Image: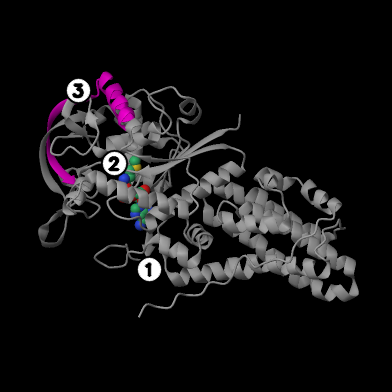
């Protein structure tokens, strides 16, 4: 059985339509899922929407409709976005799903049975926007002396009867976990969490009575669970918890929870503590990626700079958007986007470099060799190029992608593309046509082989365009995994059959900046 790999994204609040940050996280997770599949692993990939809580209840109230109506409409928008961006999830979970209520109540009972839940009274600060409780000492001063959360969101003084979770019992175990190399990345987030836990942990209020839009607390029906208790549980609902299903045995603990930097506390402190309390294994890794900014600014309704990611995908193409986001931003850090940056990056690297390489090579094969693939003899320059390309595609890029260093992995790939372009210029096959037709063939077929390697390696990032290139080359669909890179028999098969390629259609047209709106 192939080595299983379970990856999840955060589940999104559907209190409004998806934004670029949601698209970014979905794309990054999809790149990882596709990459691991092409490495031969059995992947399970889960994403979805986080539909309970006060934030959803208030938003629906503002709009004069029920939370469920709002959730249905907006959750759908997230799913449609995922589908449009080519996100290959295995389950799109909604926290209103019946199995999710069941799983949340089951983990609650397990925590209770372990003696970690008790009833008391909560008095303190709550931020609806963050759906988070804060200590007085964590608050910052906003305009006019208003109290704000450390994330800059308004807080409300809250007094309620509440169930509490004995988070304080888990301080030492959590410190041990956080210090485990690889559990939380990047490093900077880990230091923040270690210092937060070292400062001492208070018990956490985990139920609410002032509204009822949530999962009912078992045996305490006037309470609904604090939204983060049920939200975090989505990761195990999707595997069938509390039943010992095949998926559960195969995929838990998760290999990777991919989330943004603002919710690291919930995933590396609260979630492992809940799991420990319920006697369940904790996830292997949590990665807190950075934020995507619009020309350096956070998108917000008040700034009027909120961009619909579907519009970006329509304007520039899904694969171009995916490529830009994974290439431009060092994963883990914040990054910025603008239409100009997308156009520049995609034109210089995809259209002018990789696309042009594919188009030139295949056109010359088609024109000068009748498109026929045949065996050829290599010289040192050809061998050196193929060695460099193979190394970038089969070793360097995969090593970087395993480490979630996507921009560095793509950089290694790009270096190999540039090496191919330098090789074409050096070898000048168009001149060889008249002087040494055999040598021309060897040069073009060397590039043909290099293109296969390059297209296989970049599939996780630009799946549509990479497979279009592989189709043009005639690489069989079942010979496109990373493991196939080291096997050259595909070429011999084509050559023996006298495979003939069609005249190529350009796959990477240059992008134009859209006309500014009047
Ligand atoms: O936090 N750039 O939901 P959410 C990059 N429901 N990532 C961003 C971003 C940006 N500008 N803005 C948000 C929630 N994100 C909870 C999660 S998980 C059990 C519950 C990321 O819709 C954010 O960091 O506010 C999070 O990982 C995801 O988008 C969903 O954010």
Q: Nearest the camera: 78 or 191? A: 78
Q: Nearest the camera: 456 or 399? A: 456
- For label 3, the SS is loop
Which mark is on residue 196? 2
- How packed mark 1 is, by other alpha carbons closer than 10 Å (few <14, some 14-19, many 20 or more), is some
Residue under the point 48% across and 31% down: 251
Residue 425 locus on image (x, y percent)? 74, 72
The magenta-colored residue range is 101-127
- For label 2, the SS is helix
Distance from mark 1 CB to nearest ligand 1 atom below 8 Å? no
- For label 1, the SS is loop
Q: Which residue carries the number 1 mark?
A: 295
Do the CB atoms of the residues marked 3 and 2 lie less than 8 Å apart? no
Residue 224 locus on image (x, y percent)? 20, 33
Q: Note whether 372 is above or below 221 in the view shown.
A: below
Point out the tag, 1 or 3, that comes first from the N-terminus. 3
Q: Note whether 437 is above or below 234 in the view shown.
A: below
């Amino acid at each position: 059985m192939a080595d299983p790999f379970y990856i999840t994204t955060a589940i999104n609040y559907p209190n409004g339509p998806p934004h670029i940050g949601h698209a970014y996280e979905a794309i990054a997770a999809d790149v990882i899922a596709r990459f691991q599949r092409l490495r031969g692993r059995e992947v399970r990939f889960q994403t979805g929407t986080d539909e309970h809580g006060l934030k959803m209840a208030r938003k629906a109230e503002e709009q004069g409709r029920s939370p469920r109506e709002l959730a249905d409409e907006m959750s759908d928008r997230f799913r449609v976005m995922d589908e449009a961006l080519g996100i290959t999830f295995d389950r799109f979970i909604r926290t209103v799903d019946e199995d999710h209520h069941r799983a949340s109540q089951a983990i609650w009972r397990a925590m209770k049975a372990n003696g970690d839940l008790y009833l008391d009274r909560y008095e303190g600060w709550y931020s609806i926007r963050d759906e988070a409780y804060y200590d007085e000492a964590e608050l910052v001063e906003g305009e006019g002396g208003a109290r704000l959360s450390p994330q800059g969101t308004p807080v409300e003084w809250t007094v309620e009867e509440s169930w509490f979770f004995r988070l304080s019992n888990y301080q030492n175990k959590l410190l041990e976990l956080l210090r485990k190399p690889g559990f939380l990345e990047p490093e900077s987030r880990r230091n923040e969490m270690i210092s937060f836990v070292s400062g001492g942990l208070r018990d956490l209020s985990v139920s609410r009575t002032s509204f009822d839009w949530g999962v009912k607390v078992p045996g305490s029906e006037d309470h609904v669970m604090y939204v983060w208790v049920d939200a975090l549980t989505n990761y195990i609902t999707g595997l069938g918890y509390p039943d010992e299903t095949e998926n559960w045995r195969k995929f838990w603990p998760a290999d990777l929870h991919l989330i943004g930097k603002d919710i690291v506390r919930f995933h590396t402190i609260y979630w492992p503590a809940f799991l420990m309390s319920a006697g369940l294994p904790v996830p292997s890794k949590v990665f807190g990626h950075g934020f995507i900014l619009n020309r350096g600014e956070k998108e917000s309704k008040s700034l009027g700079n909120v961009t619909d990611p579907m519009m970006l995908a329509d304007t520039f193409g899904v694969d171009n958007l995916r490529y830009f986001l994974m290439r431009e931003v060092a994963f883990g850090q914040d990054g910025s986007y603008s239409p100009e940056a997308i156009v520049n990056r995609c034109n210089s690297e995809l259209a002018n470099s990789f696309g042009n390489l594919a188009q030139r090579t295949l056109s010359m094969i088609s024109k000068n060799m009748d498109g026929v693939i045949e065996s050829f003899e290599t010289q040192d320059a050809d061998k050196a190029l193929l060695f460099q390309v193979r190394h970038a595609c089969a070793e360097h890029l995969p090593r970087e992608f395993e480490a979630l260093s996507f921009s560095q992995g793509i950089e290694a790939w790009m270096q190999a593309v540039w090496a191919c372009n330098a090789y074409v210029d050096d070898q000048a096959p168009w001149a060889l046509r008249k002087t040494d037709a055999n040598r021309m063939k060897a040069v073009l077929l060397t590039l043909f082989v290099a293109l296969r390697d390059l297209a296989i390696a970049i599939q996780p990032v630009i799946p549509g365009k990479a497979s279009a290139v592989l189709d043009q080359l005639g690489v069989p669909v079942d010979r496109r995994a990373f493991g196939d890179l080291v096997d050259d028999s595909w070429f011999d098969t084509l050559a023996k059959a006298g495979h003939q390629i069609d005249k190529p259609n350009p796959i990477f047209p240059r992008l134009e900046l859209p006309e500014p709106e009047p």
